[in-house]
Image: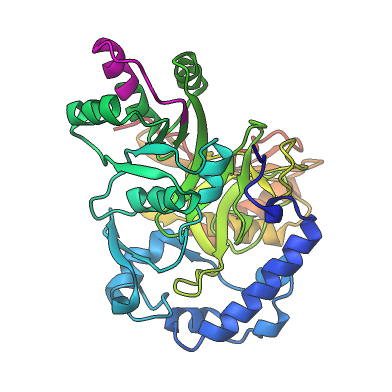
């Protein structure tokens, strides 16, 4: 049985980078005139100069949190597609509502590699329990299964008893869906005294903690995780190495400081920003709003692409303090003025029935001049007074948090 989907997964990293950026420039030149939002995003930027990740950072990030407003101004897809809606394969709706296009082509969502890494092969029968109702989930996974040559049971969500009947009769060896629903199905099969045919699973859309991983494995199911979104398809996937999630081919993934367009150092936690090489939906520096970090080195499974540590929370930390919003970008602006500092974190608390702000700043040495300058910078940036606390280098957690709201709930 082959270990890898194709040779692209094991090519030299520098070859992949050159190929990705060459394909990116070609794609952008082809579609920039037919995707209005993309053209605005590239205003003043030479496509020919986008040769590496450093050049990519000169392009502003478009964030998922802005899509609802952007699509309302320019329905249905905010000018981010390069073809008319009627030329797409499916027009989908995610909560928000956010409207998601699906284009034509084999494995358009890029899920086949993830299914392959999870052990699914041609002629396998897979039970797809992701939703087929308006949202992309079911179609994302089904397209990859079909690309591999699998037969698909389009189960969707709900109707658990009917799904149990289908599993008992059709005997799927694979499962696609959330880890929570996998457990429900396994429990119901056991209660009904039905032998479980499911041996492999690709799960996404919910947390898969170690306790649940162990329970699923004890039931005889070899389950792997995928990180996906409705806009981008499968972004990264787990492999037999069980060592981070390998970034999908055809994507350029960056980790940026929340609230900014700037990449963080390797290993630092930040927002996942993705560039997708899809001519129909050419997303350029799309901010997912999710936090993660790059795992150093190459996966022991032999795949050479970068790896993500997995989902580590949300990047949107915009917080209301004393009736005014404070944004991570404002803290990033302070950091730019004081490049000698390490991490910064604004901690919001409550005392004497009032909101309080404390800016914690990593510095090699403390002094009243530095604290005073930071207090002035904090007030200038947020228009509110706050206290400054100088802490030792590397003492703040590497969790991507720029603003920590520690006020009691309610």
170 lies left or right of 240? left
Pick the residue in front: 341 or 356.
341
Residue reaching furthest to the front:
123
Q: Which image quadrant: the C terminus?
A: top left
Q: Is residue 70 left or right of residue 15?
A: left
The answer to whether residue 258 is above or below residue 218 is below
Does residue 336 lie above or below 216 as drawn? below
Position of 124 with respect to 152 (left or right) is right
Quarter-wise, where is residue 387 in the image?
top right
Residue 212 found in image quarter: top left
Judge whether 75 appears above or below 123 on screen: below
Q: Position of residue 5 (x, y in %)?
A: 62, 48
Residue 247: tell me if it is visible. yes
Residue 141 is a magenta residue: no
* Residue 255 rendering spot, x and y as whole percentages: 63, 53
Which residues, given as a range, are shown in magenta? Answer: 185-200
Compared with 318, 162 (above or below) is above
Of the pair 215 and 161, the residue shown nearer to us: 161
Q: Is residue 379 visible?
A: no
User: How many numbered marks appear?
Assistant: 0
Image quadrant containing the N terminus? top right
Q: Which residue is rendered at x = 53% and y = 39% of the image?
A: 312
| Closest to the observer, 57 or 112 | 112
- Give the percent coordinates (x, y) of residue 102: 37, 65
Observer-nearest of 266 and 406: 266
What residue lies at 70% left-to-right and 74% top-to-bottom? 22
Residue at the location (46% across, 51% down)?
Answer: 144
- Give x and y (percent) for residue 25: 65, 78
Answer whether residue 191 is magenta in the image. Answer: yes
């Amino acid at each position: 049985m082959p270990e890898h989907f194709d040779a692209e997964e094991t090519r030299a990293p520098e070859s992949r980078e050159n190929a990705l950026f060459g394909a990116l420039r070609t794609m952008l030149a082809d579609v920039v005139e037919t995707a209005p939002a993309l053209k605005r995003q590239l205003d003043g930027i030479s496509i020919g100069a986008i040769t590496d990740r450093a050049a990519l950072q000169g392009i502003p990030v478009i964030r998922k949190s802005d899509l609802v407003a952007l699509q309302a101004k320019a329905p249905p897809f905010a000018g981010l597609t390069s073809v008319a809606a009627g030329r797409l394969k499916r027009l989908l709706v995610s909560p928000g509502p956010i409207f998601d296009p699906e284009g034509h082509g084999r494995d358009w969502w890029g899920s086949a590699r993830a299914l392959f890494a999870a052990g699914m092969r041609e002629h396998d029968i897979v039970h797809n329990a992701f939703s087929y109702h308006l949202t992309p989930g079911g179609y994302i996974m089904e397209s990859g299964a079909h690309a591999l040559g699998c037969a698909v049971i389009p189960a969707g969500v709900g109707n658990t008893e009917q799904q149990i009947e289908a599993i008992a009769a059709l005997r799927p060896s694979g499962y696609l869906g959330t880890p929570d629903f996998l457990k429900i199905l396994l429990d119901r099969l056991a209660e009904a005294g039905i032998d479980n045919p499911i041996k492999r699973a690709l799960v996404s859309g919910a947390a898969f903690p170690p306790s649940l991983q162990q329970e699923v494995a004890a039931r005889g199911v070899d389950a792997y995780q995928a990180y996906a979104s409705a806009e981008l398809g499968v972004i990264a996937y787990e492999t037999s190495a069980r060592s981070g999630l390998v970034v999908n081919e055809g994507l350029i993934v960056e980790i940026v400081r929340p609230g900014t367009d700037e990449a963080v150092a390797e290993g630092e936690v930040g927002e996942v920003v993705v560039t997708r090489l899809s001519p129909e939906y050419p997303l350029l520096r799309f901010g997912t709003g999710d936090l993660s970090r790059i795992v150093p080195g190459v996966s022991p499974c032999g795949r050479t692409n970068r790896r993500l540590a997995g989902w580590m929370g949300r990047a949107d930390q915009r917080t209301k303090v004393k009736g005014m919003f404070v944004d991570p970008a404002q803290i990033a602006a302070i950091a730019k003025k004081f490049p000698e500092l390490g991490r910064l974190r604004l901690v919001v608390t409550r005392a004497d029935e009032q909101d309080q702000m404390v800016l914690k700043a990593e510095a090699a040495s403390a002094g009243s001049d530095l604290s005073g300058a930071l207090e002035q910078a904090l007030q200038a940036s947020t228009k509110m007074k706050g206290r400054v606390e100088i802490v030792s280098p590397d003492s703040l957690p590497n969790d991507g948090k720029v603003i920590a709201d520690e006020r009691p709930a309610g």
